[in-house]
Image: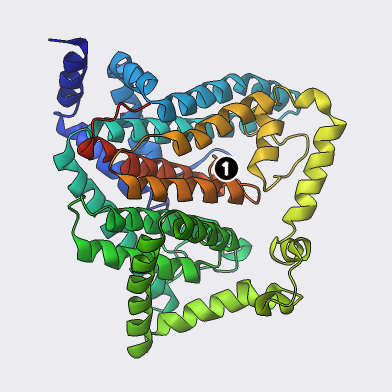
Amino acid sequence: MTQSEYINKKIENLFKPLYIRLALVLMVVSYFYNLPALKYSLNGNNELRLYDMVGLVILFIVFNNLKLITIYVKSKTYLKYLNTFIMWAGFTLIFNAAFSIYKGRPLWFVQTCLYYYHLLVFFYTAVLIAMYLRQQSRYKYLASLILVLAIAESVLVFSQHAGLVPFLWNDIYLESYGGFLSGALGPNKINLGMNMFFSFIFATGLLLQKHLKVNRILVIVALLASLATIGVSGSRTTYLALIIFVCYLFVSSTKKFFGLSIIISLGVIIAFFLNLEFIEAITTTIENRVVNKVSNPGIFTGESLDVGDLYEDLGAGRKQLSVRYFYYLIENPLIMPFGIGLNNRLLIQFSAHNIYLSLINEVGLVGLFLYFKWLTNYLYLKFGKAKSLKSVLNGLVLAMLVTLFFGEHLYIYRSLFTILGYFLLIVVMLIAPRYYFTNVKSK
């Protein structure tokens, strides 16, 4: 038996225990159910989510199979580079601890350790799912589960808009976010927007890659439901991500873009014909979140386009925050090489709403380089015959590279934490099928 055959056999044996497969299913469910599963009091009213608890099982699985999982991670560049960033981020916890003690806020370090725990759990869940999907027969069932959960979340959100389901979060979130209706995903608009954007991306990949035998009706319903929910999400960052993805798909796969457009157009026509109320909800949301926020109506007629003014109108103060953050870094150059610690904002007291600036502050230029290397590595993966999945993945990554200038959605901050986990899941779901059609040796 060769070493490769031995490793494959070990991977297959890894998933024989039922509790391992159950843990992975619960982690997938947890990305759609962000409501508290357990409350405790450490620093006020604290809450544990489903993935906080299931994550312990995930780390137990990793600990018991560390050698095998380490070999697998090192064999895949998209996992290896992210693992390197995570290790560096873990090292910078030393800086976070020092600043927390110096500032007399030790609980800040405790909170950061919890965030780092999320990072580890999301990463190793993606690794285990990548290993699990080496067997093609498993793909259909996991893909179907994700699509069903996306549809269910969409139904929940529109049920809230119809007044059938109440606001599901506590009074603090109700006051902070104005009662924004986001189902079970999170009170921040970008939680709903990005979750549904990733769901839309996944459904698009399944639809365009015909070799994948996932129920086509389920895929189309999930695609249309996700797109509709993006519309009602009110997340301008997600709107931008969708525009970037659509533009890339048009350029890279024009024929398939038009095919996708026909399906979406038919869905919109049917919705208008049936006079479905969610069309009005989407229109109203976009008008309030975009159209009414723009000071120069000429932008929509093509008469004039000033990107600076548009960013000022739609950025919700992000431009000022980014500028302040930039000057803060310039005035403190000693911070820039290595940062002041993961999740450490004790000196500047606010977020940059720009992942690149935040990373320089927290994990330094070293961390920024490792993060960027991980994210751009997806663009260089070989897909063989799975060309449609390659186009979809590239469009997703490009959308993230641009929108991360205006947010930190692929990171660990409290209001955004499930987004990273779900992103890693969808990326693995897009990458795994390339082995089913070709013998490409992946890196």
**122 or 139, which lies in front?**
139
**327 or 59, which lies in front?**
327
At which x and y percent is residue 418?
Answer: 45, 46
**105 or 68, which lies in front?**
68
At which x and y percent is residue 310?
Answer: 73, 66
Read off the residue under disc 1. 413
Residue 338 vs residue 390: left or right?
right
Identity, as a three-letter code, of the amino acid under mark 1: Tyr
Crowdedness near tag 1: few (<14), some (14–19) or many (≥20) residues, C-alpha within 10 Å: some
Q: Does 317 sit above or below residue 65? A: below
Q: How is the image coloured?
A: rainbow
Element type at mark 1? loop
Pick the quarter of the image with the C terminus. top left
Q: Does 224 sit above or below residue 36? A: below
Q: Does 186 sit above or below residue 358? A: below
Q: Residue at x 55, y 63 (%)?
A: 239
Q: Residue at x 44, y 76 (%)?
A: 161
At which x and y percent is residue 90?
Answer: 55, 22
Q: Residue at x 33, y 59 (%)?
A: 150
Q: Residue at x 76, y 54 (%)?
A: 319
Name the outermost residue toward the right.
Answer: 331
Pick the quarter of the image with the N terminus. top left
Q: Quadrant of residue 313?
A: bottom right
Q: How many marks?
A: 1
